[in-house]
Image (cartoon, coloured by chain):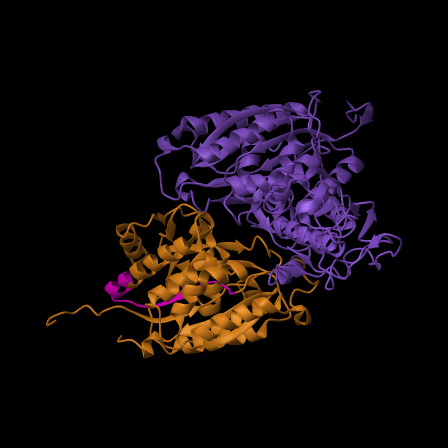
Chain colours: A purple, B orange
Amino acid sequence: MALLRSRGGLILTNPVLASYVVPVHPHPLLVPEQNEGWQRLRDAFDEARQQISDSGADVIIIYSTTWPSIIGHQIQADPNPTWTLVDQDFHDLGSMDYSFRIDADFAEAWNKANHSRGLQSRTVAYNGFPIDVGSVVALKLLNPDNAIPAVIVSSNVYANRAETTVLAKSCLDVLKSTGKKAVAVTAMSMSNRMFTEFIDAADDKIHSLKDDEWNRKVLEFLEEGRLEDVAQLSRTIHQQIRVQKVVTFKPMWWLSAMNDNRNDLTGRVLAYEALHGAGGAVVHLDPTSNGMGDKEYDEDDVEVYHGERNVLDAEANESSPESKHVDGNGPALWDPAEGKDAVNTDSAPKPVGLYPHARRVGDLLYLSGVGPRQPGTNAIPGGPIQDANGEPLEYDIKAQTRAVVENIARILEEAGSSMEKVVDVTSFLVDMDRDFAGYNEVWAETLGHYGPTRTTLAIRALPTPIAVEMKVIAKI
Amino acid sequence: MLGRTMAKGSIVAGCLAPHPPHLVYAENPPQNEPTSEGGWEQLRWGYERLRESLSKIDHDVLVILSPHWQTYVGTHFLGLPHFEGLSVDPIFPNLFRYSYNLDIDVELSKAIHDKAADAGLAVKMMENPDFRVDYGTITTGHMVNPAFDKPLVVISSNRSRHYYSVEVMQEMMMELGRVTRDAILESGKKAVVLASNSLSHRHFTTESDVPEDMSKEHITSHAMHLWDMRIIDYMRTGQAQRIIDEMPEFTEQAIAESDGGGLTWLLSTLTVPTYPAILHGYGTIIGTGNAIVEWPCYAHEEV
Ligand SMILES: [Fe+2]
């Protein structure tokens, strides 16, 4: 009885019946009566519990941010984990006895599916394994009598978007192959900055106005069903309202992939309150299309994870962030094409195909697309955007843009032109959202001074691992 | 002063005593369920030397700050006289499932707690009997004193570095170190203070089939090695102040576990020593750098 849903004219089957975002701190479970907001969160949990119980789901799948892992992802596979949990901070609120029903077969199958999609992953089934507070609170409140078996997965501290997305896809593989229907839950805070002092329960509030405003913005997106938009904003949200080094705002990557990266879900915020300063929300995302919600932009969709995350290589690179070689990371280089009216120079990077650096036509000069690669060394100032395996790296868009402008200046000079004579520029960015501001800043300091017309486009990729390229027309 | 009867307390040694559960696993002690074929001998021999050294110094209590009891709201102290249970490492449950049974010197814990509160730090006693002691404390406790026949003071790792900065973390930990020292001196007890943290802390993200396969064990990068050697050099040459001065760069560039505050707190309890520390051992654990270091205070301070 797979559920069929219409989307974009296609009949698709997604086995996720409903998704929930729930907070991780134990107050709604242990002491809801101490604060009205905590009680409202508890009521929202209760409402979600009723919906889940009515949903006909075969399994509850929890992605928990309070279970960090290092060696890939871990999946709970003890059929009946039983223990008493005490929170590391809020131990005075009481103890949490638990005894859960875990779908161990599903856990093992998910682990296998992870491996076949290239992920590092393992199951854990040990007496006394410390199930994390987020999972315990979620399962005790959403599934108190263990009516539906559960599966819990960790949040890997090194995992990037690609890895987290593939983790969801392998989970969907298992749901599809077993014919099971699921409720997907992310146990997470919104803003996670708590008060670092002890407070009276009655005085609880969101830590700052800024955190509160961001939380409300994120919840507005979710209420509009724009889950993929929130997923794509994950890094920004992390920077704005998350305590650094605690796992990134990753759960939305997982949850969005579990929902086929859609922006047209039917969302409802059941409650949003403070938990010792952190933002706690219970959100319900129904897969029924709300008929709206186009995606404004997209990140690469990833089907298979390509092995090691290369965090170590990336680490080694960090020692010299200004200049990184792209050897083995990009297409072969060519000598610039010679020909009538061609302008070529050794002081600009070698082309990646048979073309000249520039060509004269009358008193106009047309430049081939210019990137930031350094002539001679081929290094990319600010660093390449990905490694040889296609895994994303941190890079500096301003350094790249500056290097582009310098390369342009050298080619213009070789042709007897100069920056003042640039007429028109077309710029290409591979990540408009991330890079436009930095690029624009450098533009204003350099070419922008001279007043050429400009068009900026977002494109999927450039042939070398660079983030920006410019196409220039100048007078001679 | 004439007529004074109560002996003055003292810190007899300060130690950097990291807590990788791998070391307990490699030893196959009766308390740990999984069994191994050994491994990480350099570090285990280092701990052997530390134990040998501490066995020659009379002491009553071990005071531990572990980065794996992570508290975001203040600094907490174990506040009941006895804890026992099973500790399962959430990240390496395949290696560490340890039955612990340990005593707490609640009196000294409370004394440090009270002084810290007076100094304006947010502090709390942990008095829930169901609480599970963190695996960092247990691993360090085991490696230093496997019989657990001396009481512990266990201090949580306040995550102020994550909330604010390394500078704020250090300010708080310097203060916590001062009050820890004062409380120990007033207690009349002889204490060993232990910071349970590694140095450079970049892990490998994969594990070999046999975790103790030493052909796979090495530092994750040259830069990490250089940082570890730099910090160890400061320790061995009595330049503790430089460690504190360089802590922001060290924690950031080496992702060092000292961001949990343990090392700064330790150096503060020792009044930032200018005498050389003894390096008992150095080695890597899944790529992270670990040093076992002892500051032999008894030889340098009036006790
Ligand atoms: Fe650790």
Q: Which segment is the magenta one?
A: B182-199
Q: Is residue A203 left or right of residue B214?
A: left
Q: Residue at x 67, y 48 (%)?
A: A419
Q: In the rendered image, is residue A394 in sight? A: no
Q: Is residue A474 magenta?
A: no
Q: How many marks?
A: 0
A451 and A168: which is toward the camera: A451
Instruction: Residue B145 in the image: state x and y as whole percent.
Output: 44, 69
B240 and A341: which is toward the camera: A341
Q: In this view, does B294 lie above or below A64?
A: below
Q: In the rendered image, is residue B270 in sight? A: yes
Instruction: Residue B282 in the image: state x and y as whole percent.
Output: 53, 73
Query: Which image quadrant is residue B185 in?
Result: bottom left
Q: Is residue A310 above or below residue A298?
A: below
Q: In which quarter of the image is the N terminus of chain A?
A: top right
Q: Residue at x 48, y 76 (%)?
A: B280
Q: In this view, does B246 lie to the left or right of A106?
A: left
